[in-house]
Amino acid sequence: MNFQPRTRRGLLAATASAALLLVTACGGDGGEDSGSGDGLGLVSDGTLTACSNVPFPPFEVEDPDAPSGYSGFDIDLLQAIADEMELDLEVLNVSFEALQSGSTFAAGQCDIGASAITITPEREENLTFTAPYYDSLQSLLVAPDSGIESIADLDGKKVGVQAGTTGLSYAEENATGATVVEYPGNAELWSAIQAGQIDAILQDLPVNIENAAADPAYVIVEEYTTDEQYGYAMAKDASPELVEGIDTALENLRGDGTYQEIYDSYFAVESQ
């Protein structure tokens, strides 16, 4: 699915309808410790600790009103998953490169990565992924009066990408003659194009849509179908109970309509 994002954050209806099923899957007896995370191999008992690279709207943004201090599609959905598993959610802000390489898990910083992480064979060598939860596209955002109408016009231009991402890979493979400039995240990319340091940004479509909405002088001139899907990432040797628990919770949230409610709050189809 690929719809036009909106910036408002949906109110989540946290549910626990599958708690008994999850306890059984994790070997619990339904007693008072059933939500503690026993057997899940969590960094902190009773808490699902997530690492994310913030900001990356509409997927991750700081939000003092949210239980974890962060919101966005990834975080709201993960909060609902944590609620379903009867766990608290803590979110840590880390670099995307450290997250997608698996070093944050090796260091024992977090249980799960929530940062619009595309599932790729290369990443699966170091990470375990949940079932996919979002389909994405790549896109090209250009500066005002740039004369760039397609990726073919980037010859001799500077195109900004986020380090370690599939946008970087796509630019390297398809932006013939362009100078590819890497930045840590979207905030740095956005500042660079506004300052005239780069001529274009090549990255995930929903994020570029947010950028264009923030300043209508910048426009998306192309979208690229890459068959990318996001998944929540975990350590390669993550507890099978944790992986199964998260996938079960995600499936339940799809089944009871909570997933669609969160999805629609960010990516609803605009009426014609």
Image (cartoon, helix red, strand yellow):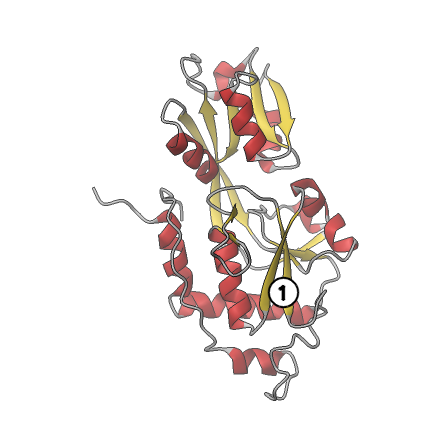
- Numbered disc 1: secondary structure: strand
Confirm whether residue 211 shows in the render.
yes
Where in the figure is residue 56, as x and y percent of width and height? Answer: 53, 41
- Picture quadrant of residue 122: top right
Q: Which residue is mark 1?
A: 48
Amino acid at pointer 1: Leu
Residue under the point 58% across and 48% down: 115
Q: Nearer the viewer, residue 133 or 62?
A: 62
32 horizontally vs 65: left or right: right
Residue lying furthest front: 64
Closer to the camera in the image, 40 or 244:
40
Number of numbered discs visible in the structure rendering:
1
The quarter holding residue 91 reads bottom right
**Residue 170 in view (yes/no):** no
Image coordinates of residue 1 in percent, x first then y, are: 40, 49
Q: Is residue 39 left or right of residue 119?
A: right
**Residue extending furthest toward the right:** 107
* Label 1, residues with CA under 10 Å away: few <14, some 14-19, many ≥20: many
Q: Position of residue 197 (x, y in %)?
A: 57, 17
Q: Is residue 98 left or right of residue 203?
A: right
Instruction: Place residue 3 in its image quadrant.
Output: top left
Camera-side residue of 41 and 223: 41
The residue depicted at 73 percent of the width and 57 percent of the height is: 236
